[in-house]
Image (spheres, rainbow, N blue to C red):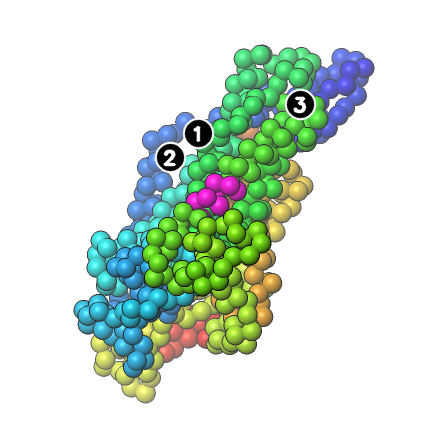
Amino acid sequence: MAVVTAVIEDGTTRRDEAAEGREALGRDVLGRRLPPLADRLYPPMPKDFEGGWIATLAITALAAFIRFWDLANPVKFVFDETYYAKDAFSLLKFGYARQFIDQPEGAADKAILAGNLDVFKPSPSLTVHPEVGKWMIAAGEQLFGMTPFGWRFMPALFGALTVLLVIRTVRRMTRSTLIGAIAGLLLAVDGLHFVMSRVALLDIFLAFWLVAAISCLVADRDWTRRRHADSVRALGEPDDFAPRKFGRWLLLRPWRILAGVCFGLALGTKWSAVWVIAGFGLLVFAWDLGARRALGVRFAFVKSALIDGVPAFLSIVLVALVTYTATWTGWLLHDNAYSHDYASKNPATGVMKIVPDDFRSLLHYHQEVYEFHTGDYIKNATHPYSSNPAGWPIIARPIGFDAVNDIKPGSPGCDAPAGTNCLSVISAVGTPLLWWGGALALLAAVVLWIGQRDWRFGVPIIGFVTCWVPWFAYDDRPIFFFYAVTMIPFTVMAVALVLGKILGPARTASGAAAPRRLIGSAIVGAFVVLVVLNFAYIWPILTDKVLPHPDWLSRMWFKTWI
């Protein structure tokens, strides 16, 4: 009896002693006939190329429209815009961050809103996040001026572009334009992602660069397996595996280099990206190992570690590190930047003598920033909107970015009856039905990833976990629900994949219309419609609309939301 290798969907293998006359090759663990190996390595993409892009651009345009609508209001600095918008303008004007006038309190904000931009002191400022996100905000200020629309332009643009990336990534993963479009539409109408796309904070840029990097990794998986599939087709599909004949040395993988650049820009926006890099580094190694096992390569683990793992580390981690360092060019070029003179005042000792002074000063700057984020000062701080990460998946404690209370009846927009006041708020709250459905979908994704060995579910699981779990190590300091905006793209990926399972195939194996398709379409359609209606209902508290107090309270579903 010959020992043969049967390849199952995710690229893992089993060994089966075949009885005489049994075609074990090309059957799954249940004995079902599988498609040819080449098609399993690289399933064909959907043939609706034009339709796929029409759907993508239409949903992206919708996301952009609602994000840019009335973007300049409110005409004020919302929440931490007071730091990031001014730091961005300082980078644009001086090349490094300067302190701004702060006496009397709010003096710089009032001056800028009045058109006076001379608000900076000559002394440098310690900024506690890297500079990429602030440079991106600065690009909008360069285009449209130091105005609310100017500093919010780039967040809105990149929020909409994140929707585009999610559509194309899910379409590639599922080979379905419909499932990709559902994922993009759900992200477009998420309340948290919507609000974060309309304020000049850093987290929307972090979400974009992370999704961009992971999109590149998914594209690399396709790019690699397509070349493996071409090798299989060139040799023909043999009756018996010839393991040594298969496998290609794919050392230069452009999608991984681009992923490294995107990861570096994510890290240059916020350091929390490091956990996502680590998580997906392990996942892409598992993908490579699975591909080589599927090809029947002997000693696949060792060979994959050497042939795939080392180049992957260089392409992703090293490129990310180089990119991240390059994002500090402005700081390195300006001697007046904060702590730039550290090395000149503190001569190097030991091994640090080989490090150039500019980079030694930069390392010290990083140490100061880390101490700010982890020191006793911040651990002893409190904030009324501080939120434990354990509650983020179910929106236990959202955050209010702006509020004007006690608007009297008869004031513009307030049609409340006498004795009842109005208010206007910007609440960074996720669309509840989407987040609660997403929490269930993520649990289902774990089961489907492990139980059915469906590689696609690993993408949202690893993305969600690496954007969420590390925050538990910092729950002794004030942290906020809006950090979870990096989680929601992966949540909608999980939702879309699960909805795809519910929807089912359009046709049976015999080519007849699948009877369950009608029921699946009704369930999927109902869920998407309900999420859209839920988003429409909470729209006023996302966009600073004036509401009578009872109307506002009807959207505050839990006491912890107030």
Q: Nearer the viewer, residue 358 or 184?
A: 358
| Labels 1 and 3: the sequence-earlier one | 1
SS type, badge 1:
loop
User: Picture coordinates of residue 479 (x, y %)?
Assistant: 51, 67
- Residue that label 1 marks: 46
- Residue that label 2 marks: 52
Residue at 36 percent across and 72 percent down: it is: 402
- Residue that label 3 marks: 297
Residue at 38 percent across and 29 percent down: it is: 48
* In the image, farthest residue toward the left: 115
* In the image, farthest residue toward the bottom: 419
Left-right relation of 141 to 56? left
Q: Is residue 115 visible?
A: yes
Q: Which mark is residue 546?
A: none
User: Which amino acid lies under the numbered mark 1 shown in the image of this protein?
Assistant: Pro
Q: Are marks 1 and 3 in contact (CB under 8 Å)?
A: no
SS type, badge 3:
loop
User: Which amino acid lies under the numbered mark 2 shown in the image of this protein?
Assistant: Gly
Q: Judge depth for marks 3 and 2 and give the one in front.
A: 3
User: Which amino acid lies under the numbered mark 3 shown in the image of this protein?
Assistant: Val
Q: Are marks 3 and 2 in contact (CB under 8 Å)?
A: no
Residue 323: in magenta span = yes
User: Picture coordinates of residue 114 (x, y %)?
Assistant: 19, 72
Q: CA distance from mark 3 to mark 2?
A: 36 Å
Left-right relation of 84 to 69? right
Could you classify mark 3 by the number of other residues whose Cα lies within 10 Å: few (under 14), some (14-19), or many (20 or more)?
many
Q: Which residues are magenta?
A: 317-324
Q: CA distance from mark 1 to mark 3?
A: 30 Å
Q: Main secondary structure of the magenta part?
A: helix
| Labels 1 and 2: the sequence-earlier one | 1
Residue 195: in magenta span = no
